[in-house]
Image (tube, coloured by chain):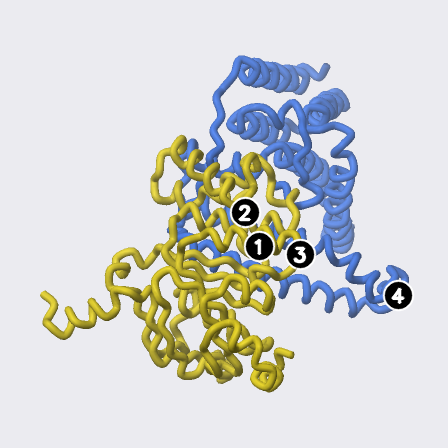
Chain colours: A yellow, B blue
């Protein structure tokens, strides 16, 4: 039974997908990667993390997705109350798609989550086809990932997340290594996605087009949090943190 | 055993298109018979040679000539080391050691060639399928399959090495004069593979991996599979007859 305080908290948290409080992370060598990170992510919101190399962007994404080892990590990461039972419904897109591909064919890779969950192969095939259509890779099912371009592999990895119907998606440098046309395609796909999204990116055009809010991270600390237009147009702030 | 590594690149072939279970049965049968039947007479060796040629033609033929050559070259370097130790050991005083070495060398060549040819006809998806139909416990099969996956990544890293050498202006002649550089490069390749392996681990965890691998691949046993199995059995039986009668 939840008490009145817990009920109040539940109502308060219902609109949030993620609540991060005083998150800290230290590597085994003592290097601080994250320090006192606090923020809330509303349901359906798309937030971009920007910051210079080594600012802790990827580490923050890994920590929030639960993929970072617990040792050295402190603070609390709460999912919205209604979502706690489905904590596994998270998707993570790595910088390099080659780090992500675990199947020998496109359909095996994209359908991994479905087969793991015991979805019947016929139904799983249908869902894989839908996810591939969503990322403009329809008909690629029997292709080998090794024959695909970097951009195609990236979109295929995205399809692998989408079939799991995640509520929350983490994207680590989604535009890295893509040509302008591929970035345009990716942007269109990401814009159409209703999921809550937290992306680390150095592609400011993508951030401007996609993000509802921007979180500027430097040396593991949140330096600024605001609208993309406000932060990206603040030359002094951007220069100070090595982004201009 | 997957599409990632260069010597084992899967090429379309007769055996490659057959049922995965047939490939395992043919491979196991060939290995068992080739290792059990001693290579005493030229007729037996010739018979084995003919079967190897048929297997080679059935698993890609000329398109796999280079890979086959590389594997044998790799094997011969090991055999060369064993040969030196055989000469240095007790064998110098007698012929028993040399006879043992000869037997070992021939058996190794048969085993390596058969394994290489069969492995190049089975892809990663078929391996996952096989582990399921053969009911191999998932902790064992997953470990083996993950090793294959990582092995593929290691090969991929190695494939980048020549380009990395050239991009830094290092010729093979320069490397021969500075062998310590090769050790350093190998270290880098291994470190990069470990890094990629740990990323893959995260990818597996991120997708809820719980010790089991999956594939959509399925296969059905055809008449051609049965005929191939019967044909292989007949060839092996014939080899047994040759070994027994000597002709």
In this rendered view, identify the residue nearer to me: B14 or A31: A31
Position of A10 relative to B72 (above/below) = below
Position of A89 relative to A108 (above/below) = below
Residue that badge 3 annotates:
A180
**Both on one chain, marks 1 and 2?**
yes
Give the mark nearer the N terminus: 1 vs 3: 1
Disc 1 + disc 3, Cβ < 8 Å:
no
Q: Quadrant of the N terminus of chain B?
A: top right
Residue that badge 4 annotates:
B174
Whole-Å distance between the Cαs marked 3 and 2?
18 Å
Q: Which chain carries label 4?
A: B
Disc 3, SS: helix
**Both on one chain, marks 3 and 4?**
no
Whole-Å distance between the Cαs marked 1 and 3?
18 Å
Residue B116 locus on image (x, y percent)? 66, 37
Residue that badge 2 annotates:
A156
Whole-Å distance between the Cαs marked 3 and 4?
40 Å
Mark 3 vs mark 4: in front: 3
Q: Residue at the spot x=59%, y=50% of the render?
A: A185
Relative placement, left or right, of A152 versus B163 is: left
Q: Which chain carries label 1?
A: A
Give the mark nearer the N terminus: 1 vs 2: 1
Disc 1 + disc 2, Cβ < 8 Å:
yes
Whole-Å distance between the Cαs marked 1 and 4?
35 Å
Residue A42 locus on image (x, y percent)? 35, 66
Disc 2, SS: helix
Give the mark nearer the N terminus: 3 vs 2: 2
Report crowding for label 4: few under 14, some 14 to 19, many 20 or more residues within 10 A (C-alpha).
few
Residue that badge 1 annotates:
A97
**Both on one chain, marks 1 and 4?**
no
Q: Residue at the spot x=88%, y=67% of the render?
A: B177
């Amino acid at each position: 039974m939840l008490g009145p305080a817990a009920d109040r908290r539940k109502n308060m948290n219902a609109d949030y997908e993620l609540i991060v409080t005083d998150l800290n992370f230290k590597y085994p060598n003592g290097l601080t990667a994250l320090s006192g990170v606090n923020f809330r992510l509303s349901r359906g919101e798309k937030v971009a993390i920007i910051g210079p190399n080594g600012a802790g962007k990827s580490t923050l994404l890994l920590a929030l997705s639960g993929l970072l080892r617990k040792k050295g990590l402190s603070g609390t990461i709460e999912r919205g109350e209604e979502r706690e039972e489905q904590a596994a419904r998270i998707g993570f897109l790595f910088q390099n798609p080659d780090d992500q591909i675990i199947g020998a064919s496109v359909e095996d890779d994209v359908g991994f989550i479905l087969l793991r969950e015991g979805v019947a192969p016929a139904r799983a095939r249908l869902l894989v086809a839908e996810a591939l259509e969503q990322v403009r890779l329809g008909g690629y099912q029997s292709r080998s990932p090794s024959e695909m371009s970097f951009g195609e592999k990236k979109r295929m990895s995205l399809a692998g997340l989408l079939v799991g119907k995640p509520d929350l998606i983490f994207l680590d440098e989604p535009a890295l290594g893509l040509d302008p046309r591929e970035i345009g395609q990716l942007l269109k796909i990401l814009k159409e996605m209703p999921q809550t999204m937290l992306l680390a990116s150095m592609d400011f055009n993508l951030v401007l087009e996609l993000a509802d809010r921007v979180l500027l991270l430097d040396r593991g600390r949140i330096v600024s949090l605001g609208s993309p237009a406000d932060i990206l147009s603040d030359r002094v702030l951007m220069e100070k943190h090595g982004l201009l | 055993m997957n599409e990632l590594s260069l010597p084992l690149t899967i090429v379309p072939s007769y055996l490659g298109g057959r049922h995965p279970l047939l490939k395992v049965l043919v491979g196991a049968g060939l290995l068992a018979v080739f290792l059990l039947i001693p290579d005493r007479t030229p007729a037996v060796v010739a018979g084995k040679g003919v079967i190897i040629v048929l297997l080679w033609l059935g698993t890609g033929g000329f398109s796999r000539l280079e890979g086959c050559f590389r594997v044998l070259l790799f094997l011969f370097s090991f055999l060369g080391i064993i040969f030196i130790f055989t000469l240095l050991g007790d064998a110098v005083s007698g012929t028993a050691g040399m006879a043992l070495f000869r037997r070992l060398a021939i058996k190794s060549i048969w085993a390596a060639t058969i394994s290489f040819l069969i492995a190049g006809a089975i892809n990663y998806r078929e391996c996952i399928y096989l582990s399921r139909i053969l009911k191999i416990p998932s902790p064992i099969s997953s470990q083996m399959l993950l090793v294959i996956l990582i092995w593929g990544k290691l090969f991929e890293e190695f494939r980048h090495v020549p380009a990395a050498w050239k991009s830094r202006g290092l010729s093979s002649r320069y490397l021969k004069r500075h062998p310590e550089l090769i050790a350093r490069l190998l270290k880098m390749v291994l470190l990069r593979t470990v890094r990629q392996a740990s990323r893959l681990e995260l990818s597996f965890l991120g997708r809820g991996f719980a010790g089991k691998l999956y594939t959509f691949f399925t296969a059905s046993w055809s008449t051609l599979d049965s005929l191939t199995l019967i044909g292989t059995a007949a060839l092996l039986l014939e080899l047994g007859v040759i070994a027994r009668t000597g002709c």
